[in-house]
Image: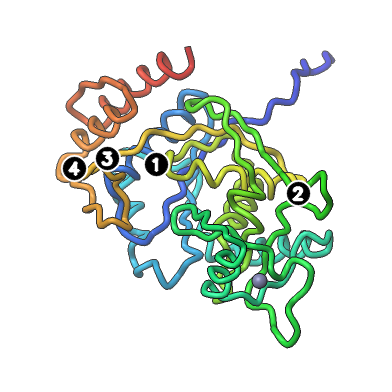
């Protein structure tokens, strides 16, 4: 009997597309879906779909099924049944518990208004995408008589040397990236005042639990990456590779998003929609059928991204 040939343990490629079903796919989300599918296929890996529906009040019923149908019409079929985050809350609770036990979580009593007032008092006007950098009010304990509304991650430990936590990572398209987590983000919320799980925690838990090796998603999510890497570090989870894809710009020069009312994707001719998505990725693709367009896009992706 011959011994099995052992190769270094490289985790198998597993990619995913993880839409929030707050509305049907738009042109920008098809670009991200196509890119993650192409990258998984180009690596001979698996491709999963995860419906990120933890923010239930923002997810109209049936939108998840609509998105799956849109993907299916474009030939983007997952290699395993889709997962819904709303069915996975026990995993998020376990992760929060682990972080709490390790002393990385604290209760926060602040309202948004109180946070703005505290920041203004410190002369701090830093604001990212309308998100306030938390001033650390409850970091050393809740103010007297207050109760915790939300749970926050202590993004860096106390102490002079650790107050300036800068995270570095490599993006396959954007190159070397960095963010000062303590100054640009601050202690971020893991469980919200309304009881909903924060996106960052759910994504990190799910990516690890599903064995995701490669995250391919739109560039609008790039600045979430340091928060997710920090959670991976503190939970002892592996760090996936990252590739953030170009955004689709609207006529007004703003990125298309469900928030600014991007219209739903026109899928009357799926091959056309796929060709347009491929063009955003810099892939020049011909073909009349979905299968032809996907096959050509895959060839072009291999040449462009894996050469
Ligand atoms: Zn607070």
At numbered mark 4, what does the secondary structure look like: helix, strand or loop? Answer: loop
Residue at the image position 77 percent from the left and 15 percent from the top: 5
- Badge number at residue 77: 1
Instruction: Choose the circle earlier in sequence order: 1 or 2.
Output: 1
Look at the picture and state if 66 lies above or below 292.
Answer: below
At numbered mark 3, what does the secondary structure look like: helix, strand or loop? Answer: loop
| Mark 2 lies on residue | 163
Rendered location of residue 179, percent (x, y): 60, 40
Instruction: Choose the circle earlier in sequence order: 4 or 1.
Output: 1
Q: CA distance from mark 2 to mark 3?
A: 37 Å
Asked if the residues shown at circle 4 and circle 1 are in contact, with their CB atoms under 8 angstroms apart, the answer is no
Residue at the image position 55 percent from the left and 65 percent from the top: 120
- Specify few, some or many for label 1: CA neighbours under 10 Å numbering under 14, 14-19, or 20 or more: some
**In this picture, residue 91 sits left or right of residue 200:** right
Instruction: Choose the circle earlier in sequence order: 2 or 4.
Output: 2
**In this picture, residue 38 sits left or right of residue 100:** left
**In this picture, residue 259 sits left or right of residue 208:** left
Q: CA distance from mark 1 to mark 2?
A: 45 Å
Q: CA distance from mark 2 to mark 4?
A: 42 Å
Scheme by which the image is coloured: rainbow
Q: CA distance from mark 1 to mark 3?
A: 26 Å
At numbered mark 2, what does the secondary structure look like: helix, strand or loop? Answer: loop
Asked if the residues shown at circle 3 and circle 4 are in contact, with their CB atoms under 8 angstroms apart, the answer is no
| Mark 4 lies on residue | 251
| Mark 3 lies on residue | 249
Residue at the image position 46 percent from the left and 56 percent from the top: 51
> Does label 2 point to a residue whose CB lies under 8 Å from ligand 1?
no
At numbered mark 1, what does the secondary structure look like: helix, strand or loop? Answer: loop
């Amino acid at each position: 009997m011959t011994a099995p040939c052992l190769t270094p343990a490289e985790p198998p490629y597993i990619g995913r597309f993880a839409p929030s079903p707050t509305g049907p796919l738009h042109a920008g989300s098809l670009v991200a879906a196509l890119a993650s599918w192409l990258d998984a296929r180009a690596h001979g890996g698996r491709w999963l779909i995860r419906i990120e529906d933890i923010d239930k009040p923002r997810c109209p019923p049936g939108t998840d099924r609509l998105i799956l149908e849109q993907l299916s019409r474009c030939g983007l079929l997952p290699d395993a049944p889709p997962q819904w985050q709303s069915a996975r809350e026990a995993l998020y609770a376990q992760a929060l518990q682990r972080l709490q036990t390790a002393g990385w979580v604290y209760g926060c009593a602040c309202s948004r208004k109180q946070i703005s007032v505290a920041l203004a008092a410190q002369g701090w006007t830093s604001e990212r995408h309308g998100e306030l950098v938390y001033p650390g009010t409850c970091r050393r304990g809740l103010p007297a008589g207050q109760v915790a509304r939300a749970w926050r991650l202590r993004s860096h430990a106390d102490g002079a040397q650790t107050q300036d936590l800068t995270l570095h990572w490599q993006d396959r398209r954007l190159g070397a990236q960095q963010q000062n987590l303590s100054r640009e983000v601050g202690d971020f919320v893991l469980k919200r005042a309304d009881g909903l799980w924060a996106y960052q925690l759910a994504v990190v838990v799910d990516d690890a639990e599903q064995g995701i090796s490669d995250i391919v998603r739109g560039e609008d999510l790039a600045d979430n990456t340091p928060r997710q890497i920090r959670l991976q570090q503190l939970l002892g989870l592996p760090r996936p590779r990252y590739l953030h894809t170009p955004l689709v710009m609207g006529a007004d020069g703003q990125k298309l998003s469900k928030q600014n009312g991007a219209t739903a994707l026109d899928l009357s001719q799926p091959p056309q929609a796929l060709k347009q998505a491929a063009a955003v990725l810099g892939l020049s693709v011909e073909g009349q059928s979905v299968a032809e367009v996907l096959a050509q896009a895959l060839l072009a992706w291999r040449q462009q991204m894996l050469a």
